[in-house]
Image (spheres, rainbow, N blue to C red):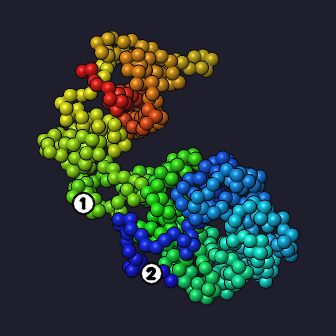
Amino acid sequence: MSSSPSERNDVRNGERTGELDDSFHVFDTTLRDGAQREGINLTVADKLTIARHLDDFGVGFIEGGWPGANPRDTEFFARAREEIDFQHAQLVAFGATRRAGAKAAQDPQVKALLDSGAPVICLVAKSHDRHVELALRTTLDENLEMVRDTVSHLVAQGRRVFVDCEHFFDGYRANPGYAKAVVRAAHEAGASVVVLCDTNGGMLPAQVQAIVHTVLDDTGARLGIHAQDDTGCAVANTLAAVDAGATHVQCTANGYGERVGNSNLFPVVAALELKYGKKVLPDGALSEMTRISHAIAEVVNLTPSTHQPYVGVSAFAHKAGLHASAIKVDPDLYQHIDPDLVGNRIRMLVSDMAGRASIELKGKELGVDISGDRELVGRVVERVKERELKGYTYEAADASFELLLREEAEGRARRYFRVESWRAIVEDRPDGTHANEATVKLWAKGERIVATAEGNGPVNALDRALRVGLERIYPQLAKMELVDYKVRILEGKHGTSSTTRVLISTADGNGEWSTVGVAENVIAASWGALEDAYTYGLLRAGVEPVE
């Protein structure tokens, strides 16, 4: 049985004990269980890409799907054999025990598992007596024979076999003797690991720890854990099972999965490496965790969770002035690990809650060191608070804050152009079509410029007009594009005259930055954010301001 939490070494500096071997398994099931999340629809190409990311991360096993059950999974295994040279992971095919009353050697579904070429096969087996009788419509004894026959047949064919005992914890509470009999049947037939599944996700950590400990003692099988997150305890339940002696954890990237999801791979692995001191990844892989998490989110077309432990952009973000003051002295005072260990970073958020320490640390983060000038720091703090009172937010708009900071530090605003006026026209025609046109009048490098453009909406028209006017003088603008646009009404009680905040994200191929604008109408707020976006982009490109 593993050490208790109080006996473990909390590895804050990334030092781990032991070599990577078969004594502990990290098993990823994103491509099967994770793909069952609502909103995720993976192509074969998507699955191959994710498999490469997971292998780069260094998990031991990647469950690729159910070959024979659908053409996509069958194709995935065929292509994975040819297209992926796995460096760390073994590919796993998922399937079920043979049909009742048949023989594993003649079962087409079992044959498809072998034909997949996967070196490891994970079988799902019923371990809840009611599911055996109501879902499989067979006897309890026949179900045990289905487990024995299928496992022994696959082992005889040279495959390593894991068995997922579906609904194990619910089945154990209903009929502990039978649930343990299924574990024994799989173990005695040659299964390398028997995985106890909290399929309905209703268990709590103390229950999981007690049951895993008992089953381990009573069966002698090597045990794994598969936890769903319906109580919000999947990660805690996984670690509780490890505390009780489980040496195989099944997880999904970013916790993707059916209903509310599965045990999240990244906090589980980080806890095992950094809190338990277990070496479960190859050297250097843990520092790739944030990148891998975000890369997989992009493939499945879901926005990365900003508040996800370890890898979220807010995981090491500090807003309160008290926190910032402490972090200035010692980052460990308000952080449980060094974020570099998981490829993340400290972020200082600037808001009306910010004190001097927050502003100083944020300035240093942005490359503007103002820590020696108390008067300057005080002016920046007051200006931030004044503008946030009007509706601005700088915690989500670093570029706008840097422009404000530099203006105070340098005693002048960075200006590449001066706006004389702008206007946007929206024309609603009788035939149901719309026309959007914008005109901007501005000065740049001593030249008066008037530019007009049409666009898909008034903001897009303004953006195009600004580009038409300035790209000849500042060709760097051609590389910049707006990649995100968010509008928030701040005071809905004022109806259509409510204050509006606009956040714009802009990219130039080498990075991305965010700017904010606030006004009583959405077009004016958008213009303010656009001005900041292109001003910051030119600053970032190394262009010297003209005034």
Dot 2 or dot 1, earlier in sequence = 2
Q: Is residue 74 visible?
A: yes
Q: Amino acid at mark 1?
A: Asp
Where does the image place residue 247, in percent across and percent down from the top left? 55, 75
Where does the image place residue 391, in percent across and percent down from the top left? 32, 38
| Displayed quadrant of residue 142 | bottom right
- Mark 2 crowd level (few <14, some 14–19, many ≥20, 10 Å Cα): few
Residue 3 tag number: 2
Q: Nearer the viewer, residue 260 or 143?
A: 143
Residue where numbered disc 1 is placed? 330
Q: Is residue 495 visible?
A: no
* Left/right of residue 297 with respect to residue 540 in the rendered view: right
* Left/right of residue 60 with respect to residue 474 in the rendered view: right
* Left/right of residue 504 with respect to residue 323 in the rendered view: right
Q: Residue at x 46, y 62 (%)?
A: 283
Count of all numbered marks drawn on residues in the image: 2
Where does the image place residue 463, in percent across and percent down from the top left? 44, 24
> The C terminus appears in which quarter of the rendering?
top left
Q: Are marks 2 and 1 in contact (CB under 8 Å)?
A: no
Q: Residue at x 28, y 59 (%)?
A: 331
